[in-house]
Image (cartoon, rainbow, N blue to C red):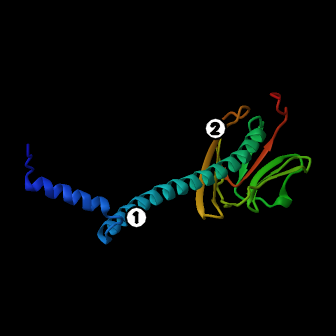
Amino acid sequence: MYSFQPMSQLRKIEMYKKLLEKKGLTLVELIITVAILGIIISFMYTFFYFNYDTLLRTGTRYEIQSNLNQGIKTMEDELRYADEIYIYGKKDEGDFDNNKNYIYIKDNGVKIIKAANEQKIFSANNIEIYESESDFKLENNLITIDIKGKYIPTDEEFNIKYTIELLNIKGNNDLKGSIIEYINIKGDDSH
């Protein structure tokens, strides 16, 4: 028997054979492929760059917070058990009483001067701390520390407020200033 195939099927078979014999891509196919790859790569670059930038900013903020928290923790350890606290707007270092303790911000760091002329200076790398006339605020038995500054490598500014409960202070106090003068009569019995 003789089989008859329609002409359209023969053409399809011939075209299929020609496509199999062909060994390369046409210019149009190549341009479309490169364009699609370019779009995919640009989306991937944007995605990875955004994530990398976010990671760097998070690392910077963590460094700022951890450095400043260390200084605030030192101040909290000093002030929590204070028996008397006064806050001054301004006072020269030469006017400090040798029997009292002082905390203030100066020379890009937090200075703690103890009664026995013992000094602790807290300063953080790459951080500029601004001096202000109202870094400290005392209301009743709560003292609020307000530290402002900037992270030098990125010029990113920050403002950290921290409130400490003073366990030995009672009364209606409402003071603001840049220098804390305090006395610890009993000392810290918690350690």
User: Toward the viewer: 61 or 112?
Assistant: 61
Looking at this rendering, what residue extends furthest in the top direction? 190
Name the quadrant containing residue 60: bottom right
In the rendered image, residue 140, in percent from the top left (x then y), is placed at 63, 38
The residue pinned by badge 2 equals 140
In three-dimensional space, the C-alpha distance between marks 2 and 1, rounded to whole angstroms, equals 64 Å
Q: Amino acid at mark 2?
A: Asn
35 shown above or below 185? below
Q: Is residue 121 left or right of residue 165?
A: right
Q: Secondary structure at mark 1?
A: helix
Q: Please tell me how many numbered marks the rendered image carries.
A: 2
**Pointers 2 and 1 in contact (CB under 8 A)?**
no
Tag 1 or tag 2, which sits nearer the N-term?
1
The residue pinned by badge 1 equals 38
Q: Quadrant of the N terminus?
A: top left
In the rendered image, residue 48, in percent from the top left (x then y), is placed at 50, 55
Q: Residues within 10 Å of mark 2 (few under 14, many from 20)?
A: some
In the rendered image, residue 47, in percent from the top left (x then y), is placed at 46, 55
* Residue located 82% across and 32% down the image: 188
Q: Amino acid at mark 1?
A: Gly
Looking at this rendering, what residue extends furthest in the bottom direction? 27
Name the quadrant containing residue 70: top right
* Residue located 69% across and 49% down the image: 68
Q: Is residue 111 left or right of residue 49?
A: right
Q: Secondary structure at mark 2?
A: loop
In the rendered image, residue 105, in percent from the top left (x then y), is placed at 73, 56
Name the quadrant containing residue 127: bottom right
